[in-house]
Amino acid sequence: MIKFFIDSKEVTAKKGESILEVARREDIYIPTMCYLPKATAIASCRMCSIEVQGQEGFVLSCNTPPVEGINVITNSDSLYHERQNIMKLYNVNHPLQCGVCDKSGECDLQNKTLEFDVGEQDFAVRDQARKKKKWGIHTYDPALCILCEKCATVCNETVGNEALFIKPGGYKSHIEIDLSNCIQCGECISVCPVGAMASTDFKYTSNAWELDKVPSSCAHCSSACSLNYESKDGTIMRVTNESDFSSLCGAGRFGFDFENRVLNKDENAFNEAIESFKRAQNVVFSSFITNEEAYILNELKKKLGFNLVNEDARLFGEFMKNFSTTASESLYNATIDDLKISDFIISIGCSIESDNPMIKFAASQAVKNKKAWVASIAPVVEHDISNVVSQYINNEVGSEEAALAMITDTFIEDKASQQTFFDSLDLGYLSGESNISEEELDLLKTKFARKLNPILVIGEDVINHPRAKNIALLAGYLQKSELFKVIIVPPSTNTLGVSLICDLDKPQDGFSVGYNAPADFTLSAKGSGDLDMPALNQQEGTFVNIDKDLVVLNAAIKHHGYELNDIANALGVESENIIDYTSKLGFKTIEFDDLDNYYDNVGNAYRGYKIESKKNRKKATLDEVEELAEYNGSVVYARNPLRQFSSFTKDCKQLDAKLELVGSEQFALASKIKSGDHVKFSVDNVEFSRVFKLDKHMKGTVAYNPTFDMDLKSSGYRYNQVKLEVINE
Amino acid sequence: MNQEQFNDRNVSDDGYLKVDIADYPTTPWGRFKRVVDRTFKLELFVGLWVVLREMIKFDIHTVKYPEEKMPIGPRYRAVHEMKRLWESDTERCIGCGLCEKICISNCIKMDTKIDENSRKEVSEYTINLGRCIFCGYCAEVCPELAIVHGGEYENASDQREHFVDFAQMLTPIDTMKEGKQLEFEGFGAITPHEDERVKKTPLAY
Ligand code: SF4
Ligand code: SF4
Ligand code: SF4
Ligand code: SF4
Ligand code: SF4
Ligand code: FES
């Protein structure tokens, strides 16, 4: 704690806080141009200069920590002139094109130019010819760029892609890109304070002030990131976010046009739906659903007695139940924010790159800021994130249980409580079967030394694993041991919420109704079923995200058809609005309208509330590790390309949807196929037909098989041995 | 016709004609007397005679609309016009959307898009004249002197919603080529002292 004064007001700084951060927390205004709270201070603009009483010269408040007892002066004549001069320099040769610029109305340069009263310009430089560049989803106009470096900073640090960089050259300096590194996330667009980095699709279509802003949560993956849908005349034009504090991946930012447009209520289909519910044996649904709708389905189940089926959430719930018996509490204890400040990360069974992009964003920040060691235990090597992953540990397909057992054995010192388990481990055998060598584990152990915030990331591969139970027990045991914090990645947007709210069953034979899942009678938000439902950007409700936060969803577009609540009302589960259920979900009894959804001045998120972990007094013993099934020949891994998650992202016009089986040369050789071949194969009785694409960077005999075109993705183990059949014409 | 007589509002006392009218009756008896007077004095024919007399004299003071029209002042605010640039004949409007924003009766609606040359282009532009109150705000806010109020005030229509779109308002290209686009000193135009108010933005070359 450091006590000091800002404009004679006494304030205290925490360790590591800069003067600017303290000022913002205390609501004291210091102008900035290049400051980006979520990243390391860039210190390129000098706008944040302050004076320290009794000392000569200016100090940059954004990257200077306070010293005990000083009095910081945030405003004086000389500071005003300094800042005014900076604005004058920014304005030299800045095109006078606010009239057409997309940023007009929310432009930092515009605002600060007016704030510092730069009405005329007394000096000039010969301008350069500067060409606009088009880089896919973003367009760069160097003439508008003020070289604040925010875009390059997010790209390198927050996203971890190192695509953008500054091409130095004095007055000719500009931003350049290595397009092969760019993942088209649009973070650079969101932080640009001027109109230089702009969205290609949005460009010149609307002005900032014409758009209706609806704060909501992203519906595509379990991070449920905070975002704003911005719409004009009933069409979403773009998605923005609190870019100072939070991030979005490309799917969230550009995959917003998945609404289901219906013109009116289809009464016949509605009546059919009611009848179908009445005689349904099963009601199957996906986890792209709000808590309130899941609650309604559960109430309907109580009333009508059908089997409520959601394999994805049921398996996840099962996993959490087992986890809690060794962890002694119902939930895992880490969040994405913890991951950002972690210094040692082990991920097991997770596609760090694409399962949940925020995991990768966070890992990148941990690597850049905390020098974190990131180990990825998986049968595949995701080469695109090699600048984030420090150590790839390639286990054999199916051997995740053995891998986690070996990790547990390596890190746990006090083995007394689970002695039988540790005694039963045949490390030599496990190492042989899983193909994880002792050296790899030793390296991991060495890197672990003196780390303060280690985190274990548990991915979808092991949640849907044949040996999920013991893996869950091991993960819980590791959390309980306090060696690691644990984060478990829910496979779909609201898997966690559904697993907490619904009492789920295994499917049985008989007539079934599906909600965003194929069935005899289907309610679909894709518009492809028997009755149209509102999509997740047309609904009010809540999700429980990976951080165990209950977050708010608001409707950006009107839906003119029926919604699930209408069906529930007709079936006797009555309530005027669907959000009346928010306070009844079984968490906190806060009404929907009273839920917060904002960021404060320093970036603390007030989004809904955190679901509390419950104590679990059951005691479980770890099972022996079972012998492994072998996976030979061609193995495909159900893994979506980045920016694709489900049939909802598939048709978004700004997201490319390549349905390709991507594999290595070795895979091609082993399967006797070549790049461009059309192949057919089946996984869990579902037939896939894909074009094979060779990826020179990939290794091993596992190929990626996208599943985002499936109406309901399989909840089986994600690796499958397949027989490929070439069906070229 | 000269318009000074219309703009001149300094009417002196001499010009007034005092009319001598009796007060209205307040008692029932008074009212009864007035009815009787009006009925039997044939006042109607007095008026008719005046009309007839003036007709025969052929000294007519009314404007014979629609053959004859009154000239209007430059600051008159009638149906909008869209101007073109003298240099290139292209439209002046840059699609900034300020007119749409400022319009207090919400009757301007426009859409913009990016064109082949990566410039902003107006793709739709209409003014609902049925709602327009001809306040002139759009013309005043326009940074490009693109939208101005013209003198065309005849916009009767059999449609309640009478739209004007961009193409109708824009100076026809032939008129432009002939150099016949009219500049207005009227609403939305630069003021006479504009030169003094322009600020420095020096160019070094
Ligand atoms: S970047 Fe800002 S100041 Fe520059 S033209 Fe655009 S709106 Fe105007
Ligand atoms: S879109 Fe994302 S990855 Fe691409 S340059 Fe921008 S920040 Fe970097
Ligand atoms: S493009 Fe925008 S964010 Fe990037 S340096 Fe230029 S002004 Fe800053
Ligand atoms: S897809 Fe996931 S990571 Fe991307 S913006 Fe949406 S919630 Fe966030
Ligand atoms: S204010 Fe002028 S330039 Fe801007 S859109 Fe309207 S007419 Fe066009
Ligand atoms: S905010 Fe400190 S230098 Fe830009």
Image (cartoon, coloured by chain):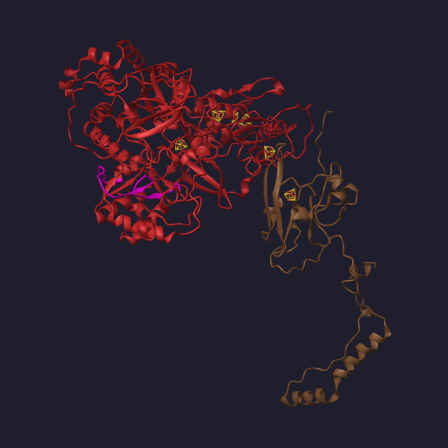
Which residue is at the far top? Answer: A439
Whether residue A63 is visible to the viewer of this picture, yes or no, is: no
- Frontmost residue, A61 versus A307: A307
- Frontmost residue, A90 versus A691: A691
Looking at the rendering, in which quadrant would you find the N terminus of chain A? top left
Above or below A325: residue B62: below
Ligand 5: give its quadrant: top right
Image chain in red? A
Tell me residue A447's x, y (percent).
32, 13
Q: Is residue A450 left or right of residue B192?
A: left
Looking at the rendering, in which quadrant would you find the C terminus of chain A? top left
Across the whole image, how many numbered discs are drawn on residues? 0
Tell me residue A721's x, y (percent).
29, 21
Q: Main secondary structure of the magenta part?
A: loop
Whether residue A519 is visible to the viewer of this picture, yes or no, is: yes
- Frontmost residue, B203 versus A720: A720
Above or below A518: residue A152: above
Above or below A533: residue B199: above
The residue at the point 60 percent across, 17 percent down is A169
Quarter assignment of residue A123: top right
Q: Is residue B56 left or right of residue A536?
A: right
The residue at the point 70 percent across, 82 percent down is B23
Quarter assignment of residue A413: top left
Q: Colour of chain B?
A: brown
Q: Which residues are magenta?
A: A501-526
Q: Is residue A702 left or right of residue A131?
A: left
Q: Is residue A47 left or right of residue A441?
A: right
Tell me residue A185's x, y (percent).
46, 28
Q: Is residue A508 magenta?
A: yes
Which residue is at the far front? Answer: A729
